Each structure stands twice: as structure tokens, then as C-alpha cells.
Amino acid sequence: VRRTTKDGRPYMLCTLGDKTGQIGGVFWDLPPELDRWLEAGLVVYVTGRVNKFKDALQVNISDLYPEQNPDLSHYLPSSPRPQEEAVTELKELIASLSEPWQGLVSLILLEQPFYQQYINAPAAKSMHHAYVGGLLDHSLSMARLADFLAAHYPHVRRDLLIAGALLHDLGKVWDYEFTGAFAISDDGRLVGHITRAAIEIEKAADAYGEIGADDLRDLTHLILSHHGTLEWGSPIVPKTLEAVLLHQVDLLDSRVQGYYDHLRNDPGDNEWTNKASPMHSTRLRRPPTWDKEPVDD
């Protein structure tokens, strides 16, 4: 964000980040030549001094310049879980499904090139699971919760619910670009992940040819309603047992991971975070065990 001091000098407020987290930055007396190339999402080298401002750490930048041909794996945050382990769980979950769900989900998720995109995509730009592999982590976490709830509550169609958990956000593969920082793509702005997922599932069901019209309609309802309300982006509210459960599982997993992500990205070791969480709209209290053991995602 470019701003001007009271005496007319330009300066910039920014957020700097790499795979370890984020920190605020300020560049006073902003050189005019930076406007020719500086934009959000670029990988840059920064020199400066870290100070404390309003109880938060901040980099007082003295110089920055672009890095040529950066290796994004050094800068983009990634899943704390080994990808091979997550992929094994994904394949085991799919193998646990009965037909036609096993065949349909396998066709959608395990075929290249989509498979590689699915296991690397973030689940969001910033709010939760905003890292390489975040979509897979979020989907697997939801599927584990769904499996438990299907055994806990009567009348739940377990395989339909787990298929919905694994497929509900597949449209986010089209939603985000990460040639630099995560950014919303044209498809994300013009179509959106809910609509894109419904389109792709319909195409896959057509190609698979083994799923009945009623099953496809019930799965499509899960995809379209998983945000829960029209105000939150779903074109229809949940109207089946599986849709009600999927929405709640999605909300639970995103809110809890949003809590973890905010604590990791908030510098300092105070009991309370320095800044309010965008998702929870308040400062958050760290668990007593936060620094003593890793969080299992």
C-alpha cells in the first residue's frame, strides 16, 4: 500500500512472507523507480532492520530488489505433512468407497495432470490452509471427520459424504495461481470454485457413465451447498443430511486451521496474538502447550 506522509514524502506498507511465516514491513522515502516494477507477489531480496511497532514486529526496509528466476519452493509455505503420506491416505480413502463413488472419485482426482495440481494447490489465498498442499490437507481432514460422523449419526450415506469431502473444493485448482504469492485467477473471479467443481463433476460423471442421475444430483447438491448460505457464496442451502454435515465439517476444519495459521503467522511469544485474526475478528489466545509440541494438522 502506497501512502504519503504529512509533509508529502511517499512510503509503502507491505506484508513480507516466505514459507516460515509473515511479517509487516514499511519502506520510508520510497524511491520512485520502484513503481516501474514493484507489485504484489514478487520475490524480492530485502535489507532492513526489525523493530517493534504497536506490539508487533515490523521490518523497516532500507532496500529491496527483485530476485531473478526464484525457486518458489523456498518461499511459498507448504504443508507440514510429507506429501507421500497424505497421498497414501487419499488413495486409501478412495479405495474404501463402494461403487459408483470409488470409480468416479478415482477418475476425477487420480488422473494426470489434474492429480498433480490437486495435491499441490492451496485451499485459500490467506484465510486457512493457504499453503502448497493445503487443499489436500483440508480435504483429507474433512474426510476423516466425515467418516467419524457417518458412524456416529444414523441414516448417513457414508460414501456419498466422503466423496463430497474429497471433491467439494476441487474447483480451487482453477481458482488460484502461484507463480509468485498466491493470487486469484481469472477463472476464480469469473466462475468460482463451487461452479467450477459442479461443472467438472458433471463432465466426469458423463465420461464415467456408471453413476445414476439421483446419485449425481445428490453429490452436486453437496458441492453447491457446502458454504451453507447464499451470503457465504453457495447458490443453495443444505437440504440433505449429508449436505448439512458437509457444511459443518467444512466450517469446523477451516475455522480451526485458520486459528492455527494465525498463531503461526503472528510474530511474538505473548499469550495473546498481536493482531486480530481476519477469520475470527479478534486477537486469539495461544494454547498453554503451543510452544511445547508441534500441532498435528
Image: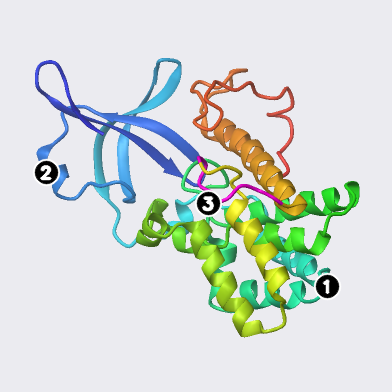
* Nearest to the observer: residue 151 or residue 12: 151
- What residue did someone put label 2 on? 33
Secondary structure, mark 3, is: loop
| Residue 238 drawn in magenta | yes
* Callouts 3 and 1 close, C-beta under 8 Å: no
Q: Residues within 10 Å of mark 2 (few under 14, many from 20)?
A: few
| Residue 133 drawn in magenta | no
Q: Amino acid at mark 2?
A: Glu
Q: Residues within 10 Å of mark 1 (few under 14, many from 20)?
A: few
Question: As drawn, is 283 to the left or to the right of 53?
Answer: right
Q: Amino acid at mark 1?
A: Ser
- Could you tell me which residue is drawn at 30 percent across and 46 percent down? 40
Q: Whole-percent x and y of residue 85? A: 73, 62
Question: As drawn, is 37 to the left or to the right of 42?
Answer: left
Q: Whole-percent x and y of residue 199? A: 52, 69
- Could you tell me which residue is drawn at 66 percent across and 55 percent down? 139
Magenta span of residues: 231-239
Q: Which one is earlier in the sequence, the residue at label 1 or at label 2? A: 2
- What residue did someone put label 1 on? 98
Disc number for residue 235: 3
- Indicate the quadrant containing the N terminus: top left, top right, bottom left or bottom right: top left
Task: State whether residue 115 appears in this view.
Answer: no
Question: As drawn, is 247 to the left or to the right of 197?
Answer: right
* Nearest to the observer: residue 168 or residue 134: 168
